Image: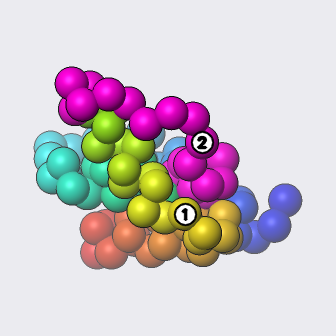
Amino acid sequence: MSDLKQQFEDTLNYVKTAEGDFQPSNELKLKMYALFKQASDGDVTGKKPGMMDFVGRAKYQAWEELKGMSADEAMQEYITTIENLKA
């Protein structure tokens, strides 16, 4: 496993197990979701959710905005964002 991939996995584990009362904004949640999906699955796939599926549509659009970003770039940006929040 590459160093970046290991660092990404460690960061994901940190996010899953972190304690505290930090309440991220919806924008930050969407950004992190999109970066995770881009790093894990690549460019967005599937049909865009309907107009009444507000959450699904917002997630899809956030991920769609990262189209063309490499998995490594998405992993690095995810890691950097979390590290900045920790500081």
Which residue is at the front of the view, 77 or 56? Answer: 56
Whichever of callouts 1 and 2 sits on the residue coming sooner in the sequence is 2
Q: Which residue is mark 2?
A: 45
Which secondary structure, mark 2?
A: loop
Which residue is at the front of the view, 11 or 54? Answer: 54
Percent position of residue 35, x then y? 48, 58
Q: Which residue is mark 1?
A: 67
Which segment is the magenta one?
36-54
The residue shown at (36%, 50%) is: 61
Percent position of residue 16, x then y? 44, 39
Residue 30 visible to the viewer: yes
**Which quarter of the rendered picture does the C terminus lie within?**
bottom left
Name the residue type under label 1: Lys
**Is residue 39 in the magenta section?**
yes
The residue shown at (75%, 70%) is: 3
Percent position of residue 71, x then y? 66, 64
